[in-house]
Image (spheres, grey):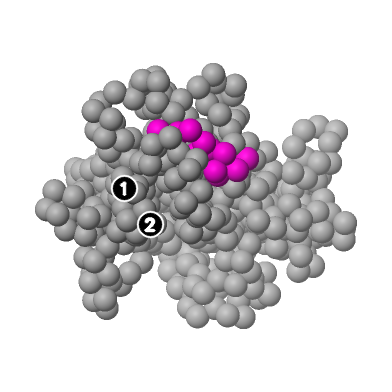
Amino acid sequence: MKIAVWGDELASWVAVAQLAAYGNDVRVPQAAAGTTEIRPSQSSVRAEPGLMELIQAGVIKGQLSALATDECEEVVVHWLAMAPDEEDKAIALVQRLAQRADGSLLVINQSNFGIGASDRLQALLNSDAGQAVICLPDTLQQGRALSQFAQPKTLLVGCEDATALQSLQAILRPFTGALQSLQLMTRREAEFTKFAITGMLALRLGYINELANLADLLAVDIDVVRQGMGSDERIGPHYLAPGCGFGGQHFTQYIEGLAGLFSEKRRSTLLDTVLAENQRQMELPFRKLWQHYECDLSGKTVALWGVAFKPGVASIDNAPALRIIDALLAQGARVRLHDPEALPEVREHYGNHASVCYCADKYEAAQAADALLLLTEWPEYWSPDFERLAQSLRAKVVVDGRNVYDPALLRAQGFTYYGIGRL
């Protein structure tokens, strides 16, 4: 099947790679006139595990090609996974498609343009001629995107045309062998469902962080409370890990979009409060360290383990580490950074800042530091050589922004330990 994929987001490139891998003739518009390069522009997308290799395999097999816009527009199936600020670009594209096509046309929209966007695109097409828009919300998570596309457990599908639905099912057939549930709804309901899911996750994260901050004041161990909450089958354990805030560009954009809808339609500040509290939560490890050193971090050297917004990705989009680094630098501290994947993006962000040191080894980052801040729970940080760490640090102070370590274990080894709501 000939499919044109539009957009430079993670969702678009995963669709490109996977659709090409299963025999489709996948077309992407040329990045620039005269070039046939097929390459995501965002370094965090290029760092997605396995993605570039699968794209290259599609090119080698001849299933994937970069073509002029006209050649991409001439196909019948179009996959849109564009950035939230590109709705005008998507509208112009669909208008051109409508002018070119006399017969059937299928537009699969994964873009986060807001609620009602897919209906606005549908209004540009001729439904009587078999031209339809399907809303297929992007549910991919960075770090696991390829496997989630290849083996989804559930799919949300906003479709009001039976023929279009059959076409979508044919396209996705190679990927639905383990599908447990296909939730069919209207386009608008699918868009709203995606916002609702993201909002619920944000509320859970915000709530457990608020409980952890309260636990600090009540001499209660939030980890014990969290396990007790998770044992209730009505609640479960997911998204109940307190820490130094959530990040990620797409996750935050969906929450901001839903917060805007609540404010506009209901005059509700529920999610605005979650977003504001999350910004404060991001700085919590810094505040704990600042208080430890009696509000004077000038001249101190601080090691940071983990800069990516979550483990398994190279992206620093809206990462808590950025706010903490900025706060430390503003206080006159020096920072020594380690991250298994994100250092290239961090270096691009801070450049050759005199007070920022990029370290290839986590113990190198801790060398002669006055404290260690753990901000991203990469697997390699969970069980370090604590004896070696103690020898590396100048002061045995650990601020655990993800509650990875056992406080009693570290304190028994002579560390001063600060967690999030931990005794």
**Over which residues does the magenta segment extend?**
360-370
Left or right position of 226 against 65: left
User: Where on the picture, by quarter, is residue 357?
Assistant: top right
The front one of 386 and 186 is: 386
Quadrant in which the N terminus is drawn? bottom right
Q: Which mark is residue 369?
A: none
The front one of 186 and 294 is: 294
User: Where on the picture, by quarter, is residue 279?
Assistant: top left
Tell me if mark 2 has few (under 14), some (14-19) or many (20+) residues whose alpha carbon lies within 10 angstroms of its own. some
Left or right position of 376 against 397: right
Report helix, strand or loop for mark 2: loop
Observer able to see residue 133: no
Q: Disc 2 residue type?
A: Tyr
Observer able to see residue 379: yes
The residue sitting at 48% across, 78% down in the picture is 181
The residue sitting at 76% across, 56% down in the picture is 53
Q: Disc 1 residue type?
A: Tyr
Contact (CB < 8 A) between labels 2 and 1? Answer: yes
What residue is disc 1 on? 417
> In the image, is residue 153 part of the stretch drawn in magenta?
no
The residue sitting at 34% across, 25% down in the picture is 297
